[in-house]
Image (cartoon, grey):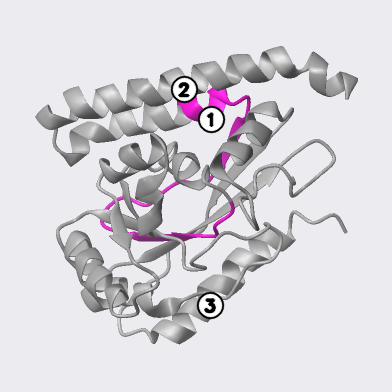
Amino acid sequence: MLRSLLGLPLTLWRLGRLALHLLHGMAMVALRFRTLDARGRQPYVQWWSAKLIRLIGARLELQGGPRAGATLFIANHVSWLDIASIHAACPQARFVSKADVQRWPLLGWLIRHVGTLFIERERKRDALRVVHQMAEALRQGDSVAVFPEGTTGAGPLLLPFHANLLQAAIAVEKPIQPIVLRYSEPGQAFGSTAPYIGDATLIGSIWRIVSARGLTVHVTFLPAVGSTHADRRALGEHLHAQIQAQLDQAVPA
């Protein structure tokens, strides 16, 4: 209890700076993005995302990097921080996100205005619409990022992949590059603070994260995989195994 009270000023300081940074991001999008094309926006997206990681007191550790050109990026899903963590290294990625993210305070507005594609996961037919949008974006040279688990997990073990969104890359014969996300804390290869799971609320999750000490965000880019003439289920299983194998390496023997 005493430790929590002693850490309260730092937590409030981080929270205040985070709120100002979110407002800054909204102003930047509203005033600056209108005069920029997608490529011109990327340095701003990268800067804003990397600074968000710093403001919450976390450290970003990158391994590898995104390939150039149109690519479908897939990543495991742990936290609401995942998009910023990936954008800090890969600002060209347009994310596919659940439609209810648009209702998040401040963050939802920002996510909606940086080219995000939204899917109504409760409607099975909506996946087909999003696949067509993703394929068209890839065909035009954009890069798209998805979380094939469809929801967040605790970290060490992947949930099953929904392979239907991989069809977008297969249809236009674009490569798929896996990204592995991991949040560690002192003494924990997989920290308990960052996962946004169960009955957690966004406000409660933000409070826990800005209160954390020694949080590190690990973003690892694995080699890209070709998708030409691939079977999406087999490809999904292969990519799932690659990401899980990378996560397993972080578990102490």
As displayed, is residue 251 above or below residue 208? below
The answer to whether the residue labelled 2 contacts the one labelled 1, judged by CB atoms less than 8 Å apart, is no
Residue ID at (27%, 41%): 114
Disc 3 packing (10 Å; few <14; some 14–19; many ≥20): few
Quadrant that contains the C terminus: bottom right
Q: Position of residue 166 (x, y in %)?
A: 37, 73
Q: Give the range drawn in magenta.
A: 51-78
User: Mark 1 = which residue?
Assistant: 53
Label number found at residue 238: 3
Q: Mark 2 points at which residue?
A: 19
Classify the position of the N terminus by image quarter: top right
Q: What amino acid is found at the position of numbered circle 3 in the picture?
A: His
Q: What element carries label 1?
A: helix
Disc nearest the viewer among 2 and 1 = 2
Q: Nearer the viewer, residue 60 or 83?
A: 83
Tell me which corner region of the image, top left, top right, bottom left or bottom right, holds residue 96. Answer: bottom left
Q: Along the polypeptide, which appears first: circle 3 or circle 2?
A: 2
Q: Is residue 163 magenta?
A: no
- Does residue 60 belong to the magenta stretch? yes
